[in-house]
Amino acid sequence: MLSHREAIRWLAAGLLLAGAGSVQADEPKSLDTLVVLGTGQQTSVFDNPASISVVGAEELGRASTSSVADLLRDVPGLTVYDNGSPGMPRITLRGETSRRVNVQIDGHALSDHSPHGAPLLLDPSTIERIEVVRGPSSVLSGSNAIGGVVNIITRRGGEAPLSGSVTATGHTATQGGSTSATLQGASGDVDWRVSAGAGDEGDRRTPDGTLDNTGHSFDQLSTHLGYQVSEKHYLAFKADQYRLEADVYSPPPAGFTDFAVTLPQRDLRKGGLFYEGTKLAPWLDELKASTYYQTVERRFESQAEMATGRAIGSASDDRQITYGVNAQAELDLMPVGQTLVGAEYERDALDTDKTSRVFLPFPPPQGQQQVSTVTDEAHIETFSGYAQQAFSLDDATTLYLGARGYLVDASLDASSDKPLADNSDERLLGSLSLVHRPSDDWSLRANLAQGYSYPTLEQLFLTTSASGTAVYGNPDLSPERANTLELGARYRGGPVTLDATLFHTRARDYIGEEDLPAAGPGPAPRRFINVDRANTTGLELRAEYDLPTLDTTTLYASGSVLERELDYGRVTTTDSGTPRLGGRAGVRHARPVSDTLMFDADLYARGESGAKLRNAEGELTSRSSGYGTLNVRLGLGHSEHFDLGLDLYNLLDRAYAPYGEVPGAERSASLTGTLYF
């Protein structure tokens, strides 16, 4: 079997050979997609200094899933992490955990103060496109962007006076499905949209049997109302609601006879007001501003019983309120290139009520139950300002220089069992990028970027419990930081499209946990501390080749090779819980059946290598085996009236369990259909 270093050499050699195979330009392909992330203004992927991936309208329209995370599975360097609940998927980027990935909806951060990071809770039917920056982007995108940024851009209103769509999807693996409907229109200077949907998924069926406690249900409502005030000014109001109930797959740990975890409530509500101004002055090309208000209400319950008769139950009711203001301007001040300036303010408040019940089977005959309730109120305020200057060194070379300053204040405002405390930070971050186009076919880039992740309120101030083990916050924590160097190349000549990135990241002040002295029987308590470091080196590659004799048939591959080293201080290990190899490869074919009907097919394999995780004591705490699945998609679409898609997964019916996820589904099918009117 190839080592990861050998795999990197082979992938690099393949990139060079494929690039040498064609030298003629072709019509624009996916590399010409316009994105906002990476430069802060509309720039094609081909000319972007950052590592960019895009899920566009075509992919979204073909999706047979109600999970946004599933839409991102094939982004190089990205893995899905569901933490036991397929209804609350999260993502990791380049091995960085979800809380180190900045998830945004329409440019507003979707913050979450749990230890797991923000879940991607949004119905795909409301999304226009998804932009992903792989790697640190804290200069332009804010905190929690060590791993990267995912910006989910929701749809605006319609163009015709009235139009709409209805979508229904069914899954054999869960005996469930989802439905959604959209009405949209435009009249004069007003455009509008209303979307609603719901889904109910049962327990997942695998080759080894049905997994109990893996079901979930949701409903969502989304609205948009826009008004073109004049040729230069546009206003919009957006509101979204997503409500989730989920079970959590949780086999009993060693020593437990019963263990159950549920999430009976996880409600997200958000409202935002947006302004866009264009060509407002000779020196002001564009001005964008927005303000938003968002709430997250969550209830988490767990129950565990040990073989000794001891029983532990806990419940947590959390309410998080976030509001903020963002403003960004594109200025034409210097002939060398555009200037981008912006400012952001965000306030995040968290109220928690946590109840713990411990039943001790002694003294006999009845035993005794201990009940404790803890309430906390805490908040974080973040103000930051940033600027980026583009320098056109010549017709083929552009340099970007950026910086962002942070002022952060956090405090524990009230608590039933802890002394009040606070934490603050002042920080200046920078970025330097270079893009060079030696020809119309090639784009070469170098990128030096810094990442920054401020501790969560839970890590700073709160006390949490998992399986009876208390984990205490630490108000003296420092932010996590990272530096990344990237070298990239993109090619779009003839039948070949390539996008490759080689990177190295050095991160420090990672927040981990340490044991505290035990106060009595049972597990010893723990607390958060800054102790860990991480170094990650990797190669990401996406390649496509249009067969010359079959111009509607394309061979493609995307994936990554990663080596991630964790430094706990006393122990250094490459068993970091990160698969070293992962990706997708396949062949897709499309052809017209008639003037209005299009048929497409996609046969592909998806997989990753195994992964292990060792803790600060060098002990192996979790592992997974490598896997590969063979899958196919068949689609039939009418240019105006309907789309049908049939996805067949795990055709060989192999049992598998990706790292960080519950075991995969059995051989199964998903059927989705959309009617347009």
Image: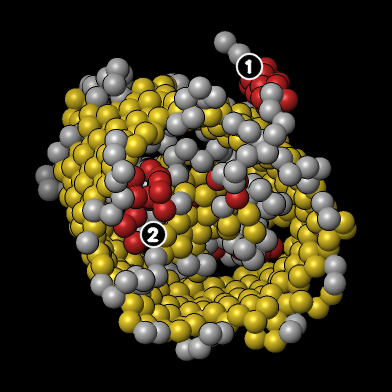
Amino acid type of the residue that numbered disc 2 sits on in the rendered structure: Ile
User: Which residue is denoted by mark 2 in the rendering?
Assistant: 127
**Quadrant where the N terminus is found in the figure:** top right
**Quadrant where the C terminus is found in the figure:** bottom left
Q: What element carries label 1?
A: loop
Image position, residue 551 (x, y; %): 49, 29
Image position, residue 364 (x, y; %): 15, 44
Image position, residue 537 (x, y; %): 69, 34
Image position, residue 212 (x, y; %): 19, 36
Question: Mark 1: few, some, or many residues within 10 Å (few <14, many ≥20)?
Answer: few
The reply to whether residue 5 is in sight is no
Rendered position, 128 above or below 188: above
The reply to whether residue 2 is in sight is yes
Q: Distance between the residues labelled 2 and 1?
A: 39 Å
Q: Residue at x 73, y 77 (%)?
A: 331
Q: Work out whether residue 200 or residue 42 is closer to the camera in this orientation and state it.
A: 42
Amino acid type of the residue that numbered disc 1 sits on in the rendered structure: Ser
Rendered position, 337 above or below 89: below
Question: Can you name the residue that lies furthest to the front here?
Answer: 595
Question: Can you name the residue that lies furthest to the bottom here?
Answer: 229
Q: Work out whether residue 283 or residue 483 is closer to the camera in this orientation and state it.
A: 283
Question: Can you name the residue that lies furthest to the right here?
Answer: 393
Q: Residue at x 85, y 67 (%)?
A: 336
Mark 2 and mark 1 lie on one chain; the one further toward the N terminus is 1
Query: What label does residue 305 carry, if any?
Result: none
Q: Work out whether residue 558 or residue 214 is closer to the camera in this orientation and state it.
A: 558
- Residue 120 left/right relative to 345: left
User: Which residue is denoted by mark 1 in the rendering?
Assistant: 3
Question: Mark 2: few, some, or many residues within 10 Å (few <14, many ≥20)?
Answer: many
Q: Is mark 2 on a helix, strand or loop?
A: strand
